[in-house]
Amino acid sequence: MDLAHSTALVTGAASGLGAATARALAERGVDVLALDLTTLPDEAHITYLSADVTDEEQVAAALGRVDAPLRLVVNCAGIAPAVRLLSSKGVHDLATFRRTIDVNLVGTFNVLRLAAELMSTNEPLADGARGLIVNTASVAAYEGQIGQVAYAASKGAIVGMTLPAARDLARYGIRVNTIAPGIVLTPLLTALGTEVVDSLSASVPFPARLARPDEYAQLVLMLADHDYLNGETIRMDGALRMAPQ
């Protein structure tokens, strides 16, 4: 799909995967609306907007800023609490579970549905394509670790809705794919220290290192270029299969 003279919307764009994706798209000359709860100063081709992905009005307002056709949406916004079902601190609180589902799953769905509505009004490209929506799951959707019951549930649901969403939107020329990253080297992870990073890196079969945010961005661009990938969840994990903890 040709992204020339188009707009992309990226959520969770102030850091990590979202930031890398926004900048990779901007380097291609795509105008990017970068959504996050906190914002950064605007950059070339990137406009940062404060928005809560779970809020219908805020997302709709952000989409109202679209000038060129919206051809690409990348959902990176999410949270990852670590709480066991039972521990010495007691039972898993319901509020944390609900909040995780609300941000990771409901937020993704909210952006997906509203963006699809706007994309459906695009003039189709030569191959009938109107747009692509990329959601972010996690390998925790398949191998959730101890303390990840809420996170794994939210990411597993994103995997589960990928194919039916792609089927629902096929008639409009809109593709839906999901990326399920393994362990990505973000600033938050780096702050844990070299020993922790080295230990995690050694658990990855090959390449024996952690993924980089720019590799996620590279995969997003590949999905935009490859028009026959649809309804698919792609693991980006170096053949990692997560241990219980």
Image (spheres, rainbow, N blue to C red):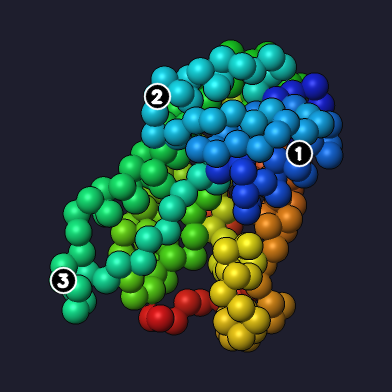
Is residue 235 depicted above or below 79 in this figure?
below
Callout 3 secondary element:
strand
| Residue 56, numbered label | 2
Is residue 73 depicted above or below 206 in this figure?
above
Left or right: where 223 falls relative to 183? right
Q: Which residue is mark 3?
A: 90
- Nearer the camera: disc 1 or disc 3: 3
Residue 227 in view in this figure? no
Q: 16 or 140, which is in the foreground?
A: 16
Callout 2 secondary element:
helix
First-in-chain label (1 vs 2): 1
Quadrant position of residue 180: bottom right
Measured as percent of width and height from the top left, residue 30 is found at 78, 30
Left or right: where 94 falls relative to 216? left
Distance in Å between CA atoms under marks 1 and 3: 45 Å
Q: Amino acid at mark 1?
A: Leu
Residue under the image location 45 percent in, 34 percent down: 53
Q: Amino acid at mark 3?
A: Gly
Circles 1 and 3: CB distance less than 8 Å? no
